[in-house]
Amino acid sequence: MSTDDHSNPLSFDLECHNINKAFGDFIAVDDVSFKIPQGSFFSILGPSGCGKTTLLRMLAGFQHPNSGDIFIKGQSVLHTPPNKRPVNMVFQHLALFPTMTVAENIAYGLKRRGISKTEQQALIKDVLERIDLPDAGNKRIDQLSGGQKQRIAIARCLVLKPDVLLLDEPLGALDLKLREQMKIELKHLQQVFGTTFVYITHDQSEALVMSDQVAIMNNGRFEQVGTPQELYYQPKTPFVASFVGDSNRWQGKVSTASGDLLSLTTENGLKLSGLPASSEPFKENDTVIAYIRPEAISIIPVTENLSTVSAIDNTDDINQCHGRIVNILFDGARSQVLVDTRCGEPMHVSLPQTGHHTSLSKGDNVTLQWNKKQCLCFRPAESNTSPHQNLT
Amino acid sequence: MPPVSTASLSNTSRIGLWLLLAPILLWLSLLIILPHVDMILISLQERISSRNYSFSVSNYTEFFTEPLYWNTFVRTAVMSVIATALTLLIAFPVSYYIAKMLTGRLKTVLFVLCLIPFWVSELVRTYGWMIILRETGLVSTFLQWLGLADQPIEMLYNDAAIMVGLIYTSMLFMVVPLVSTLDSLDNSLIEAGYDLGGNSWNVLKEIVIPHAMPGIVSGCVVVFMLTLGNYLTPALLGGKDSLWFTEQIYTQFITRFNWEQGSAFGMLLLILSSLIVWVGLKLSKQSFSKVMS
Ligand SMILES: Nc1ncnc2c1ncn2[C@@H]1O[C@H](COP(=O)(O)OP(=O)(O)OP(=O)(O)O)[C@@H](O)[C@H]1O
Ligand SMILES: [Mg+2]
């Protein structure tokens, strides 16, 4: 990202440099910097209260950063009021004007630009066709369904051809089925219009499905920015590893730290190997947190009753342990089994619906295997759980 | 459930309903409907000799043929419209500030501050204004002390004094409906108005006012009716020549003891003011049921 900055500075629609925002003593946004290339779908994903809305409102101009700078198409907009910024925002509850019809809602922004009546009509007709609601113009807002309102709210912004469209959890109010559908539709709209989208959400599947780039935000900071694949396969911090996707987690001590892989012993005596994912190298006896995803573990049923229920087989690149199924959590494609390995919490293991595992039932003994390289090891982070307090 | 018990249940609930409605029905019929019916009957009589009355509409034609009555009514209506408009102009920014700019404790405090003057009676409030505005009053003395006036100034007994008193009396009835409708306006709608390129004037005109319209109209209707029917404030602050229509009614009933004429004026006031409100609603494209809900 850093090499081609200078050759073509305008290829970034939005740049933020070291943005800070504090409410009294509480730091809501802490030194956030990022750049969004033109025409891409950028998501900010984080738990509730991590400062996503605050960041977005600073981009829209409703709040002012305490320090830092915001550039849109290479121009600083720090002193530009919201109504003059080339960005538009889709609000969490959409904020469609209930006293106006759909067409009047869309016309509101066009009128402010001094566009002639006939041109307004043409633009409204065009945008309504593009969002697939050609006859909605004369409807009142309360006559629309949730998904239709959604599309009108987006059309109302896109008709103004903003450089950047900001979306604040716009799917939050929809039911599950509609949300799935709107995810695909939003991505489609973004590609059709070619506008840069900044999308904030606390729903990881929304972020992973739609985005070109995702920033993981926690306690006002960006933990990691990357493609959905990078975040899923190469998380850089324990928070990202646990927040994106599900994970089994162990805490332990490093026993040997030579070579590519790390050997560790968990608090309950389980011996594992894993790939170090922190930038700093590990030394012996360091505290370490290891994560393995439920879907990376394979289940092998054991027929005879083993006396040593928990044992480690040190095959070259396979971690292995034994346990007993304590529960089967059926959830269609996302079904999981809970396996008690007698080493702390029961492990979550995905149950592939390929037909091989239909005979598994509660109480069965199983062997669990996973690739050592898929087990990621991190240093425990300090400021991970408590909200970030002002340090200055 | 067997039909008998349903019937008895609905019987008891019907009795309950009547019991609940009884006070309001009594109130309506005894204090509103009966007197008005009686007033209509009286207004349509003409005294021929003592205890001898005949049917006649002369009391009504009197109103239209005698310019004094007609002019007094027009003057009262125009002054009331102006007072209503001024009250709205003053109350709207105040209400907007209370409802949208303030949060928490300060909001409650300011709202209560608007209510406090109404804990004392209208009479006391009006005397308050008299103390301030009269020749030996506060303003006059203060101006003399400053040297801006070399003799006492009488600020009572003119239209401006009436106007001030009327606006002051009406403020509450405008602020309350305005604050409650503005409170229900979602802040994100205002932000969306700016975000889509509008300036403050656009946002006010296209978003805030359309949303507040029911509150504005209901406030205006109440204030207009109260002002038109006000007796105390114009009489005390306007003095003898205030020419307020309610004073004409008072004169007919009390001074001249002409109940027939007074009743006719009362009915005319009711009809004409309803007519003005109806025209106002039509002009603002609001329906009465929507405004009052
Ligand atoms: N005006 C404000 N005054 C004081 N604190 C605020 C203000 N606005 C936000 N905060 C605090 O800043 C933090 C971040 O708020 P923000 O609304 O940005 O969270 P969020 O990430 O959007 O959460 P959610 O997903 O629940 O919408 C919260 O802890 C909130 O209490
Ligand atoms: Mg939020």
Image: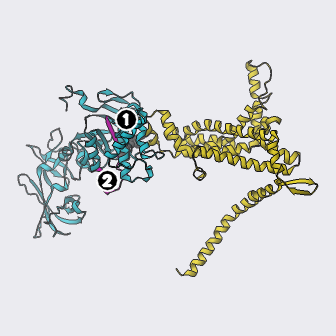
Chain colours: A cyan, B yellow
SS for callout 1:
helix
Q: B56 and B182: which one is in front?
A: B56
Left or right, A319 with respect to A10, comes to left
Sequence-first tag of 2 and 1: 1
Q: In which quadrant will I find the C terminus of chain A? A: top left
Residue indicated by mark 2: A179
Ligand number 1: quarter of image = top left
Q: Is residue A102 left or right of residue A11?
A: right
Residue on which the image places disc 1: A58
Pinpoint the chain carrying mark 1. A
* Residue A285 drawn in magenta: no
* Foreground of the two, A85 or B82: B82
Label at residue A350 = none
Is residue B149 something that shows in the picture? yes
Q: Residue at x 77, y 58 (%)?
A: B37
Q: Is residue A179 magenta?
A: yes
Does the beta carbon at disc 1 come under 8 Å from ligand 1? no
Q: Residues within 10 Å of mark 2 (few under 14, many from 20)?
A: some
- The residue that appears at 19% across and 50% down in the rendered structure is A291
Image location of residue B253, percent across then percent down: 85, 48
> Toward which corner of the image does residue B112 lie, by quadrant?
top right
- Give the SS element for disc 2: helix
The stretch of residues the image draws in magenta is: A163-183
